Each structure stands twice: as structure tokens, then as C-alpha cells.
Image (cartoon, coloured by chain):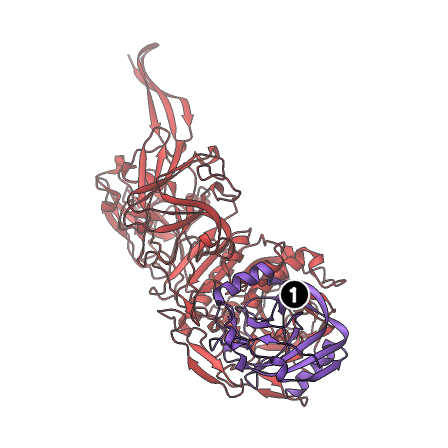
């Protein structure tokens, strides 16, 4: 079992057009994933391979995650950009895959709509989060408490197949 | 003894001639003198009235049913003061036709009698009868004999004898051609496909994208017909996979029909005017978990699928039952895109220019080339690709941008959603119309909800729609009116680039002065334009990093305005450019009381005698002045003579349209292009020598504001 501490802060009800900390209550499920074939993520705006990831199921409440022309907000765990694997079509949740942060205490946040993982250089992320204000410490939560046992998956494509079929 | 008066041309300049007059008696010279006469190009007699100096603006495009103003400036035509004339509006004749048949027959009813009076041009304005559609010449028949003969005055559009004025038909009513029933291709069980290889534009594994769409065309086709292709944006498809191999339909509150059928209203219009039109299905590019389940397709994929559809239309003789086989002209193609499709048309052009932008190893039918693209149109486009790949080709074909200021999706102000950057990057003739209060979705009739007023939550099969409070902005435009504006300007653009020169005026004039017939006069529209044929003479475009007191053309700039800075007008690049979302440099400045900003004209711009216009674009910087503002443009010649025109005669810089979404201020500054013919500065006998222009001065009065200016130039 991977033990991971994630600081999640209280947040406004919608992601809006500024960066926001994610409401811990919005994360309804967490799984720790180990890939047999490492997959590519963006950390700090640069490509990096990772074999360990977190699969998060997150409740979203607005239009912004439906297919629209401006891309949906990107979930970011620490400095690692998460990928949205599903779209909230039948439900109000999305599944996102995040590279496992290198240290405990990483916070989950969202960018404004229209951002891409390559945009999230350290400077730019700092600038975005500057507008979100500090992550309130009293909202920190240990996600590992809700995580199921670590699972091994061949690769991201296999995980996507599994996740999308489970959502039908 | 016979006396003789002899005149001899002894000198000339662009705006004057010098004559030597001598009187002789027999072989003896009695006296002689030299006279210098100022000569001007005749500025034209037809146009519209202005509320202040110069009181009349030459305008050679009108709408059918309009009355227009004909005027002679008595200071230019002092010899006519007191003379009576009949003013005819006659069907246009070429010079040879006039020579063969000089008779005058008024096309609007009866000629209008007038007598040229001394004083101002405003005392000589004549209102015509309503103009039927067509091309016309205007004649002052001073002889009163119903013929064009010596002593009369014929107003032509140019030196070659172009029409004095064209009255355009409605740009919103259906055209003259009947339509064939809509035809669909690629809707069977085995549509043609194009394979996108892994690694191209974020595609993780090879994927076969289907090629399909809707074709609408005239029932009677010419041997060769122009083609207009539509690329839609990203929206929930009408049907989604049910996981068991079937499809399930989403709520009509979200999507009422196939995404690609949402531009049928535009296809019908263009087809009735002689275009073959096709709207391409791009639902498989919708993103993770949706149709096709392709994880991260970008704009390059969307563009490439668009091109492969065009290739199919050119090569598949079975489409539309074979009616189109060999009848589409690959050298006359217009690409129209909405939202992601609005950027995809630019990327498609890039893929035609640069094979490196295509999927590796892929080719296109050689008939499909960049040279065949006659125009590009973007409706509320995103700007993601040009952000990620700034080297994307800057298109050099005519470009039109339409954008609504109450867009709740591509909002105009955030990363990837700055549509006017496409306008700034375009390198051909380019035009933009900003529709105050229009939203994003209603350009497509299949996209059901109003993104300016509505939030969607829950399942797309049984969604909950709640009011967006507050809405994105005030004074929202009803969807039917928004589509009317889109119809009118798309028709006008297609006409303008297909040979209807008069239709171009809908873009080069502010919509407050001229807008296509059928567009509600109450619609608040802002226009921008820049023409590259012939190439403009730049006075200052602020590109490069010259000091504030030197223009981009290397000339001195002086000013008494305050807080002047030249910068990139993008708030994401420079916070000082707050609320600007351009991809250009410009000058930002403030003033609290009377102030000025003075450009020294570069040598190439100092002879304005034959120039068509002096132009610049300007915008208020939000959130200052909530009221419209204006300023004056003053021209000064080398002798120090001055003439000023208040731009408020052409329209003002409107009050800021305040936009917000989910608690975020998304207000963006709105540029407008203002153009004045140099001859306007000489109205009513203003003594200024246009052949020796020296300075162009912006004169700003209280109350102050903060504005940006850019693209100060002369249109030759």
C-alpha cells in the first residue's frame, strides 16, 4: 500500500475562470495505480515519465467539464498535471489520472478552463495559484485513507479501457 | 491688329499646375504673368451626410431601398455657384457606352433639380430617391438637356469609369437560386475514413476518423462552382455510444440535432447564391469518454479531417448522386469554422502550406492547394494552436472574424480564448466584426442552450439547466438576430472575395455608417479592417521596440498625453495591457484635459493627394470611461496649414461592454478601425496641401480616458 498524504483545501463551489483549490469533499474515490509500462505526464510544464499514479474520481458541478470549445480546467496534484479520462456525461463525476507526487502534502487544484499541461511551468503555476490564495491548512486531508489497495495495470490505454467501460 | 492670349504649362506638382499667360499683339508681347492653380482629384459626389465637418462622406456602397446624399462642394466648384442643374441617378455605363449613348434616364424616378449655392457643402446636400438594387452613375446635368455633354459633371467610382454607387441586395434574404435536397455522405455503415497515426497532435494510438457531412448546393449547377466548407466546434453530440454497440440521444436541452447540421441556415444562404457547401462531421474529435473515445485530439486533427473531407468531395463521384462530380472548383474554396473549427480553418491552411504540419507521410490530392483557398472565416475561434505553435502559418488570404462579446465559452479574455489574435496574425486583407451581446452557441442551431445565461449540470440525458447569475453581459442579442448578423456578414464576405467590390465596404466602413441590408440598425457592431492590396503605407504600427518618441517608420513622435507606453496588447503577456487580448503591439496613453499625440508622416506618406484613406484603430481600455469617447484627427501640411475632423462624425469608441463569468471579470477591450479619405480634410475650402502633408495629430479633449491606438497607416 502506498501511503500518500495530500493536502486538500476547501474551495468555492465551481472552478470559475481562475485557479482554485479543490474541495476535499469533491474527491469521492482514490486509487493508487502502478503501471507496468511507465506513462508520460507533465510535471512543472515538462514531460516526465511515471510508473505510479493516482486515479481520482471527482465530483464536478458545472458546464465547464462537458465538451465545449474551451478545454476543461486541468486538475493539478502538486506540480503534476492530471489527465481527464472521462467526461461527466451521465453523471456529475470525472475520472482523472494524476502522477503520484514525490512528496506528501501535495495539494489538488484546478486551472481556469483552456489550460493545457504544458502551460503549467513553475512560474506560471505560482502566478495562477497566487490568485487562488493560500491553501487553507485546516482543510488538509489524507487521501490515502480512502484509497484502495494499490493496483497494477499494464499501461494507460488499458486503464482507460477499464475506466470507460465501468462508467457505462 | 489681333490680340492673342497664350497659356503655357511651365510647371506642375502632384497638387498644382503653373501656367504662364501672355498677351501678344501681332508679334509683340504686350504683357505676361504666371498663375499657379491648385488641382485636386475630384473627391466624389455621392455618399452620406455627416453631422459635423466635413458634413459629407463619399461612400460608393448603399443598400437597396436606401436614399443617399449627393453633394458638390461649392468651394471646389466656385464656377458652378448659382448654376442650376438636374441631378440624375442613371444605370451605370462604361465610358464607351457613355460615348455611344449620352442620354440620361433617371433610374429612381425623376431627376432632382438643384441650384449650387455658395457657402458650405452642407448647404448643397441632395437626397436621392430610394435606390433599386444595381450599379449607378450620378450626373449633374447643368445644361438641362437630358444628355451628358460638355459642362456636365459625371461622378464615377474611379478613373476607369467604375459605378458611382452600387446598391446591394439584401444579404439576409435567400439568393436567387433554387436548392437541391440536402445530400449526406459517409452516413452508411462503412464511411470513408482517414487514419491519424499515433503521436500526431496528441493521438496516443492510430485512429480511423470517419469522413462524413452534409452537402447543400443549387439545383442548377454551373460547370464549375465555388465551394464553402464548414468545420464545427466542440459540443456534446446528438447521440452518444450506449456501451452496448448502440447510440442514445442526449437531451434536446443540450443538443437538438447533429453538430454538423447546425450551419444549415448558412449553407442554404450560400447555396442559393451559387456556392456548393459542405458541413463536416467532427464529433469524433470530442475528447475523452465521448464519441470515438479518442483521448486528446487537438486542432491539427480537426483541420486534417476537414481537408480529407474536401479531398473526398473533389474525388468521390458518388456524393450527392453524382451531381457534384467534376463541378467543384478546387481553386475557389472558402473555409468557415466555428470555435475549435474557427481555429482549425487556419490550421488547415497551414497544413496546405506546410507538409510538415500534416500527419507524417500523409499527402493530399494535388488539386487541393493553398492557392485554391480564397478566404477563411472564423466564428468565435479558440486560440489554442497558435499559442502552442506560434509558427503556425499566418494566412495571407482574405480573413473574416466574427465574435460575440457575451461568449460564455470562448470568452475572449483567457488563455486559448483570445479570438482577435487570429485577426492580428492574418496577413491578407482582413476584417472583424464584434457583435455586442452575442453568445457562443447560437452560431450553431443544434447547440441548444445559451452559454451567456445558462449553466448545465447533471446528466446530459436529463440535465439541469440553471440561470447563470449574473449572465455574461448585458443587452444580450436574441439567437435569431445573432444568426442574422452572421448570415449577412458571411454572405457579404463571400460576395466581396468573389468579385463584388462594393460588398467590401461593409467591412471597411464602421457598421454604424454602413451595414448589410437585413441587419437590425439597433445591433451594436464594431468593425476592424486592414487591406494589403495595395500595400498600406505604415505611419506607425508599433512593431519593433522603438522609443515612445520614434514611430515604427522611423519618424519623430511628440505628445502631451500622459502615461504613454508602447507594449504588447495582451494582458497575459504584460499586465499593463489589462483587458487587451491582441497579438500586436500598440500605444496606450491617458489624458485628463486637452492633449495631443503627433505622428510625423514618413516620406512615403506625405503625398496624400491620391490616397484613398488615412486609417487607424483605437480602443478604450476598460474599466475606465463607461461612456463613449472620441477624439479628433488633424492633418497639417508642410506650410503649417491644418484641418481637423472629429472622429465622432464616424462613430465613437463605445462604452465598455462589461463581461463576467462565474465570478471572473472577462471584459475585453474592443478595437475599431476608423478611416478617413484625405480629401475630407479639404472640404469647404480648407487650405491644406495634401501633396505636402507633414503631421497627423490626435487631439484629445476632456473628459479624459485611457485608450490604445495601433495600425496608423495610409491606404494608397
Which one is in front, B589 or B519? B589
Q: Residue at x 40, y 61 (%)?
A: B516
Label 1 neighbour load within 10 Å: few <14, some 14-19, many 20+:
many
Q: Position of residue A3 (x, y in %)?
A: 67, 79
Up-down: is B316 above or below B501?
below
Left or right of B714 in this view: B188: right
Which one is in front, B389 or B138? B389
Q: Position of residue B631 (x, y in %)?
A: 32, 47
Can you tell which chain is drawn purple?
Answer: A
Q: Position of residue B118 (x, y in %)?
A: 21, 39
Q: Is residue B498 visible?
A: no
Which one is in front, B301 or A87? A87
Which one is in front, B519 or B353? B353
Can you tell which chain is drawn red?
Answer: B
Specify the farthest residue to the front.
A138
Left or right of B349 in this view: B684: left
Q: Secondary structure at mark 1?
A: strand
Up-down: is B66 above or below B710?
below
The residue that disc 1 covers is A43
Specify the farthest residue to the bottom.
B244
Q: Residue at x 48, y 48 (%)?
A: B567
Instruction: Report the quarter where the N terminus of chain B lies.
Output: top left
Q: Residue at x 50, y 63 (%)?
A: A130
Chain letter for mark 1:
A
How many marks are shown on the rendered structure? 1
Q: Position of residue B465 (x, y in %)?
A: 45, 83
Report which quarter residue B199 is drawn in.
bottom right
Up-down: is B332 above or below B213?
above
Q: Is residue B466 visible?
A: yes
Amino acid at each position: 500500500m502506498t501511503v500518500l498524504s495530500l493536502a486538500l483545501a476547501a474551495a468555492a463551489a465551481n472552478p470559475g475562470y481562475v485557479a482554485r483549490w479543490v474541495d476535499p469533499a469533491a474527491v469521492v474515490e482514490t486509487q493508487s495505480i502502478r503501471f507496468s509500462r511507465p506513462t508520460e505526464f507533465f510535471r512543472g510544464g515538462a514531460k516526465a515519465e511515471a510508473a505510479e499514479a493516482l486515479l481520482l474520481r471527482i465530483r464536478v458541478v458545472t458546464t465547464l467539464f462537458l465538451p465545449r470549445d474551451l478545454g476543461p480546467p486541468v486538475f493539478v496534484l502538486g506540480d503534476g498535471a492530471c489527465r481527464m479520462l472521462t467526461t461527466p456525461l451521465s453523471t456529475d463525476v470525472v475520472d482523472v489520472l494524476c502522477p503520484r507526487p514525490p512528496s506528501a502534502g501535495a495539494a489538488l487544484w484546478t486551472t481556469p478552463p483552456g489550460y493545457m499541461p504544458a502551460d503549467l511551468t513553475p512560474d506560471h503555476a505560482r502566478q495562477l495559484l497566487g490568485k487562488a490564495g493560500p491553501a487553507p491548512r485546516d482543510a488538509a486531508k489524507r487521501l490515502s485513507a480512502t484509497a484502495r489497495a494499490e493496483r497494477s495495470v499494464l499501461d494507460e490505454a488499458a486503464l482507460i479501457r477499464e475506466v470507460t467501460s465501468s462508467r457505462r | 491688329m489681333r490680340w492673342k492670349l497664350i497659356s503655357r504649362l511651365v510647371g506642375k506638382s502632384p497638387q498644382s499646375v503653373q501656367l504662364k499667360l501672355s498677351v501678344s499683339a501681332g508679334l509683340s508681347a504686350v504683357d505676361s504673368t504666371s498663375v499657379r492653380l491648385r488641382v485636386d482629384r475630384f473627391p466624389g459626389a455621392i455618399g452620406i451626410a455627416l453631422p459635423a465637418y466635413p458634413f459629407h462622406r463619399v461612400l460608393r456602397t448603399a443598400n437597396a431601398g436606401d436614399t443617399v446624399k449627393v453633394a458638390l462642394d461649392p468651394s471646389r466648384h466656385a464656377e458652378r455657384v448659382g448654376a442650376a442643374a438636374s441631378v440624375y441617378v442613371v444605370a451605370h455605363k462604361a465610358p464607351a457606352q457613355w460615348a455611344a449613348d449620352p442620354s440620361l434616364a433617371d433610374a429612381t424616378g425623376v431627376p432632382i433639380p438643384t441650384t449650387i449655392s455658395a457657402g458650405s457643402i452642407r448647404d448643397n446636400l441632395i437626397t436621392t430617391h430610394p435606390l433599386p438594387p444595381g450599379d449607378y452613375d450620378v450626373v449633374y446635368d447643368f445644361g438641362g438637356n437630358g444628355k451628358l455633354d460638355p459642362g456636365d459633371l459625371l461622378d464615377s467610382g474611379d478613373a476607369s469609369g467604375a459605378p458611382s454607387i452600387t446598391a446591394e441586395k439584401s444579404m439576409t434574404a435567400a439568393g436567387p437560386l433554387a436548392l437541391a435536397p440536402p445530400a449526406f455522405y459517409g452516413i452508411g455503415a462503412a464511411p470513408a475514413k482517414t487514419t491519424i497515426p499515433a503521436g500526431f497532435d496528441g493521438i496516443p494510438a492510430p485512429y480511423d476518423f470517419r469522413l462524413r457531412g452534409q452537402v447543400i448546393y443549387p439545383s442548377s449547377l454551373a460547370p464549375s462552382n465555388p465551394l464553402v466548407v464548414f468545420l464545427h466546434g466542440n459540443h456534446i453530440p446528438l447521440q452518444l455510444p450506449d456501451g452496448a454497440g448502440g447510440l442514445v440521444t442526449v437531451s434536446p436541452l443540450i443538443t437538438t440535432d447533429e453538430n454538423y447540421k447546425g450551419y444549415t441556415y448558412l449553407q442554404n444562404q450560400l447555396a442559393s447564391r451559387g456556392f456548393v457547401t459542405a458541413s463536416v462531421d467532427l464529433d469524433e474529435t470530442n475528447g475523452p469518454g465521448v464519441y470515438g473515445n479518442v483521448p486528446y485530439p487537438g486542432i491539427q486533427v480537426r483541420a486534417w479531417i476537414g481537408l480529407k473531407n474536401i479531398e473526398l468531395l473533389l474525388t468521390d463521384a458518388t456524393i450527392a448522386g453524382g451531381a457534384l462530380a467534376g463541378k467543384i472548383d478546387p481553386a475557389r474554396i472558402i473555409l468557415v469554422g466555428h470555435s475549435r473549427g474557427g481555429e482549425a480553418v487556419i490550421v488547415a491552411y497551414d497544413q496546405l502550406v506546410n507538409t510538415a504540419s500534416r500527419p507524417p507521410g500523409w499527402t493530399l490530392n494535388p488539386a487541393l492547394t493553398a492557392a485554391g483557398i480564397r478566404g477563411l472565416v472564423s466564428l468565435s475561434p479558440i486560440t489554442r494552436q497558435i499559442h502552442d505553435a506560434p509558427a503556425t502559418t499566418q494566412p495571407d488570404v482574405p480573413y473574416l472574424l466574427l465574435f460575440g462579446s457575451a461568449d460564455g465559452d470562448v470568452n475572449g479574455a483567457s488563455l486559448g480564448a483570445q479570438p482577435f489574435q487570429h485577426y492580428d496574425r492574418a496577413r491578407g486583407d482582413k476584417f472583424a466584426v464584434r457583435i455586442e451581446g452575442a453568445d457562443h452557441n447560437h452560431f450553431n442551431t443544434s447547440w441548444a442552450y445559451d452559454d451567456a445565461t445558462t449553466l448545465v449540470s447533471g446528466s446530459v440525458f436529463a440535465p439541469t439547466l440553471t440561470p447563470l447569475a449574473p449572465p455574461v453581459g448585458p443587452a444580450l442579442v436574441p439567437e435569431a438576430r445573432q444568426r442574422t448578423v452572421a448570415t449577412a456578414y458571411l454572405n457579404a464576405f463571400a460576395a466581396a472575395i468573389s468579385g463584388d467590390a462594393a460588398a467590401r465596404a461593409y467591412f471597411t466602413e464602421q457598421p454604424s455608417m454602413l451595414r448589410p441590408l437585413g441587419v437590425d440598425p439597433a445591433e451594436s457592431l464594431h468593425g476592424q479592417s486592414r487591406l494589403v492590396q495595395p500595400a498600406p503605407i505604415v505611419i506607425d504600427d508599433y512593431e519593433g521596440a522603438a522609443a515612445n518618441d520614434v514611430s515604427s517608420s522611423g519618424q519623430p513622435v511628440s505628445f502631451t498625453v500622459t502615461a504613454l507606453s508602447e507594449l504588447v496588447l495582451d494582458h497575459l503577456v504584460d499586465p499593463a495591457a489589462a483587458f487587451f487580448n491582441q497579438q500586436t503591439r500598440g500605444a496606450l496613453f491617458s489624458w485628463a484635459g486637452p492633449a495631443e499625440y503627433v505622428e510625423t508622416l514618413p516620406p512615403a506618406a506625405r503625398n496624400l493627394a491620391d490616397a484613398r484613406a488615412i486609417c487607424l484603430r483605437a480602443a478604450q481600455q476598460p474599466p475606465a470611461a463607461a461612456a463613449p469617447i472620441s477624439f479628433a484627427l488633424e492633418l497639417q501640411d508642410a506650410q503649417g496649414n491644418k484641418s481637423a475632423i472629429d472622429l465622432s462624425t464616424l462613430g465613437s469608441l463605445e462604452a465598455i461592454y462589461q463581461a463576467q463569468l462565474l465570478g471572473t471579470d472577462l471584459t475585453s477591450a474592443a478595437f475599431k478601425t476608423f478611416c478617413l479619405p484625405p480629401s475630407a480634410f479639404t472640404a469647404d475650402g480648407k487650405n491644406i496641401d495634401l501633396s505636402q502633408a507633414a503631421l497627423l495629430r490626435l487631439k484629445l479633449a476632456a473628459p479624459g480616458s485611457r485608450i490604445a491606438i495601433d495600425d496608423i497607416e495610409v491606404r494608397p
